[in-house]
Each structure stands twice: as structure tokens, then as C-alpha cells.
Amino acid sequence: MNIPSLTISSVRKGLTDRTFSAVELAQEALAFAKAENPKTNAYLTFSDERALAAARAVDAKLAAGEDPGVLAGVPVGVKDVISTRGVRTTCGSKLLEHYIPPYDATAIERLEAAGGVMIGKANCDEFAMGSSNENSAYGPVRNPVALDRVPGGSSGGSAAVVAQGTAVVSLGSDTGGSIRQPASFCGCVGVTPTYGRVSRYGLVAFASSLDHIGPFSRTVADSATLLTAIAGRDSRDATSALHEVQDYAAAMQQPLQGLKIGLPKEYFAGLANETGDRIQAGIEVLKKQGCEIVDVSLPHTEYAIEAYYIICTAEVSANLSRFDGVRFTTRSAKAETLIDMYKNSRGEGFGAEAKRRIMLGAYVLSHGYYDAYYIKAQRVRSLITRDFAQAFEKVDALITPVSPFPAFKLGEKVNDPLQMYLSDIYTITGSLAGIPCMNVPCGTTAEGLPVGMQILTKHFSEDLMFRIAHQYEMSGGFSA
Ligand code: GLN
């Protein structure tokens, strides 16, 4: 079995043709992932028992002639910020080294109900804060395309397992770019759905108003199928949307003739480099498909990074207060008083980036600064959302780069948080607006490093986004 070449539909074919059983596939996928993992450190935990139980359920359904689900037998990697019952969930943090959730995230329940087989938990930046996966307490992930480089972050492990071929698809989370940016660095598809499209129940919160769960895959079709399986209203997450879930895979088949695609000028200024050239080549592919390319402007883009780092730090300082040494986490052995116990547990357990953001967040929310920073950032967020709404009055979709540069070397930016924050300059706006956006590969640099192109559409227009991505893939765009 050639695990790295599998897709959701080839797994299905293998199962129905009886080339392999779901249990055989799970065993082989686990053995392959374990053998490959030392190269990248992409998995933190393997969930053999759970994978085999899920695979046995798929085999039983097939034997009984029942529908085994759209993800039947598919080996899946899951970012370690998504809660999995009985399977350790560390969030990349030392504090949660021994945390075993008593329940599953809704996305995991749905994944397994559709026949998906979770084989392990993927490494990530601590509590999903970072752009290089170097903030994990369990060591960085190496990019499978170039092992001396970062895979991007924070869902670096989820991108790496798909690029390395040790999972067919994976789940990540995106708050400001953490699905799209690592997908672009590793050369795979990564999708951030509309805010509320996938339930956040069981996703350990970073910045609740920005957090999304979404898929990684090697083909557009596989992300579309995975998203269809996990999306939809969930009564356990009040921000999950009531909109009906579309059949994205069916919507993808329509050609692109006549679509209007906008290029926001703010995203292309200063992009006279190889990344810019690859995106231009991607745009040419869309033109050949009959798309009309239009220049547009998103005038408040320049304030996005500042607004994002105020809003997300404010939210994270509140969300991380639950990790207090009493619940969930390991407890400092050193404390004599209750206050010391809180302080020492948090002080010893959180890494530098988490501490930096907790302090920034406490500051922007404190009396006297709340209006000056937090409220102002929320106003900017509204303006950015309005920019997108106005652009979508003129065009059907937007194309932008995902990252200003390809995967950088391990250690290159780790001591410069501001440089690191700039990695997300093109992805943060879509997150603030809560619109669907995704990465599709668009060729490589002369050095062979993947470059990614971002497709953005209106709220709940995932169908159109997948259609553009799929038609682009079919016309050779991935190697444009
Ligand atoms: N890199 C961004 C940050 O550090 C985005 C993270 C994310 O999307 N989870 O906040």
C-alpha cells in the first residue's frame, strides 16, 4: 500500500474492491507514520487503540452492507488543540502534558461518525500561538519539503503529516492564519471555513471570536469532503451557524467562465519577489479558465496586524486563566500558599509566547486602556469586515498571497516576535472578517520551496471557494 498517494476516494475504492480492510489500512498507516515521524516530529501522540476501534467499525458496516460514511477508513491526523476523549491533548504546552480529555470535540465526533480513522495528534505551537511551530513545548516540527525549515504554524504538525504523506487529511485550527500559512509552507491545501461553520466545541480556546477548525489535504476534493463531514450547527456551540451545509464536492464541478476575481492592491505592493511571480502565474491559470481579473482595494488592511494582536491577546489572557494548577494542568510542586501555587504552576508551565500574550492581553483590557486599545481594535475589525463586503459587491472572489515569503529556516525568526507576527500579514484580515479563505499551492521557488495562493469569498460561500480551487487544480495550477 502506498500510503502517501492515498486520497479519500482511493481509500473508498480500496475498501469496496476489498484490496484492503479498514483495519489493515489503519495498521499500515500507523506503522508508516511511526517510522516517518522522527524526521519531522509532526505527531505528538499516536492513538492506535482508537484508530483500530474506528477501523473495525468501518469494516463491520461494510460487511453488513451499510453505508460506512464519506470518510470511511481514511487515516486522519488531528491538531493537538482539539479535545479527544481518552487521548492526551497537550495543546503543545508543558502544562497539559498529562491532560486526557473526558469528551470529544464535535468535529471529532462527526469525523468518526463519517468513518474517519484518527491515527494521532499533531504537534503545534503552544495554544496555537505562533507562525513556525517553534513555540511547542515538545520541540519544533520540521518541514517535510526541506527538513532545515519550519513547516509554518501554528498547525505545523497538521500540515506536515499531510505533506509527508503519513495521513490522508488532517484537522488544524486557524485564528489568524494557522491553517493557510502552514499549508502554503508545506505545499498542501488548507481551508479556514466561515467563522461558525464548524463547531468550536472541544477546541481548546485561543481567541474565541477568531478560532476556526478546518481541513488540510493534498487535493481540493479531500478538503471539501472533510469539511462537509464536520460542518454544521451544533447546539453545544452557540456561535455555530444555522446555515445548511452544502455538498461542496458537487459544487466544484462547474467551470469558472465569467467569474470576477479581485486582486486587492494592498496585498501586492512590495511583492516583487519569487512569491509574487508564482502568484501571478496562478492568476494566469485562472484567466485562462475565463475569469475576469479586476483590481480592488481593501483600504484598512494596513491596520490588521495591530488590531489582531490586540483582540487575540485580550481574548487569550481571559481564556488561558483557566489553566491555574487546579484544573486540567500539572501543578507546581514548589508552592506553599494558594497564590504561590497559581503563580508557580503558570510560571513553570507556560512558554515565553504564551506569557507575552497573557501580559499584553491583560494590559489592553485594563482600566484606562480598554477604550484606547481594545475598543479601537474592535472598530478597526468592523472596518476591515466592511472592506471585504464592499469588495464582494464588485467581485465574486479575491486572490492574494498567503505569506510574503516561503518557509524560513528553523531558528531564523524565533528571537524576533515582531518579524514572526508579520508572517500573517495576508491571512489575518480574512480571520478578522470571519470569511472563508483557503490556501492552494501555486508552484515552488527556484530552491523548491512551496508557494501558496489564497482564495477568499463571502461568508458561507465555501461552495464557490472550492469551485475556484478545484478548477484551478484541475488545470494544473498547483504547479503553475
Ligand atoms: N500566527 C498567528 C498567531 O500567532 C496566528 C495563529 C493562529 O491562527 N492560531 O497568533
Image (spheres, rainbow, N blue to C red):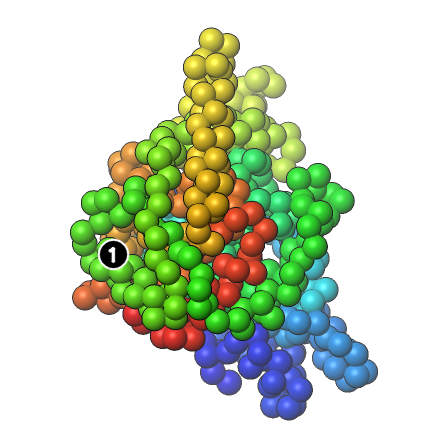
Give the number of marks. Answer: 1
- Left or right of 282? Residue 345 is right
**Residue at image x 38%, y 52%?**
262
Q: Nearer the viewer, residue 298 or 89?
A: 298
Q: Is residue 21 above or below residue 354?
A: below
Label 1 residue SS: helix
Q: Which residue is mark 1?
A: 275
Q: Quadrant of residue 161?
A: bottom left
Q: Nearer the viewer, residue 377 or 172?
A: 377
> The disc labelled 1 sits on which kind of residue?
Thr
- Left or right of 289? Residue 60 is right
Question: Can residue 245 be seen at all in this image of the molecule?
Answer: yes
Q: Is residue 197 above or below residue 69?
A: above
Image location (x, y in percent) of residue 72? 66, 74
Asked if the beta carbon under badge 1 is closer than 8 A to the nearest atom of ligand 1, the reply is no
**Residue at image x 52%, y 60%?**
464
Image location (x, y in percent) of residue 184? 36, 58
**Residue at image x 71%, y 47%?**
242
**Residue at image x 38%, y 75%?**
475
- Left or right of 184? Residue 120 is right
Q: Is residue 208 above or below residue 248?
A: above
Name, please, the residue furthest toward the right. Answer: 64
**Quarter of the image with the C terminus in it:** bottom left
Image location (x, y in percent) of residue 171? 54, 57
Question: Callout 1: few (<14), some (14-19), or many (20+) C-alpha neighbours within 10 Å?
Answer: many
Q: Quadrant of residue 125?
A: top left
Q: Quadrant of residue 30?
A: bottom right
Question: Can residue 76 be seen at all in this image of the molecule?
Answer: no
Image location (x, y in percent) of residue 314? 50, 26
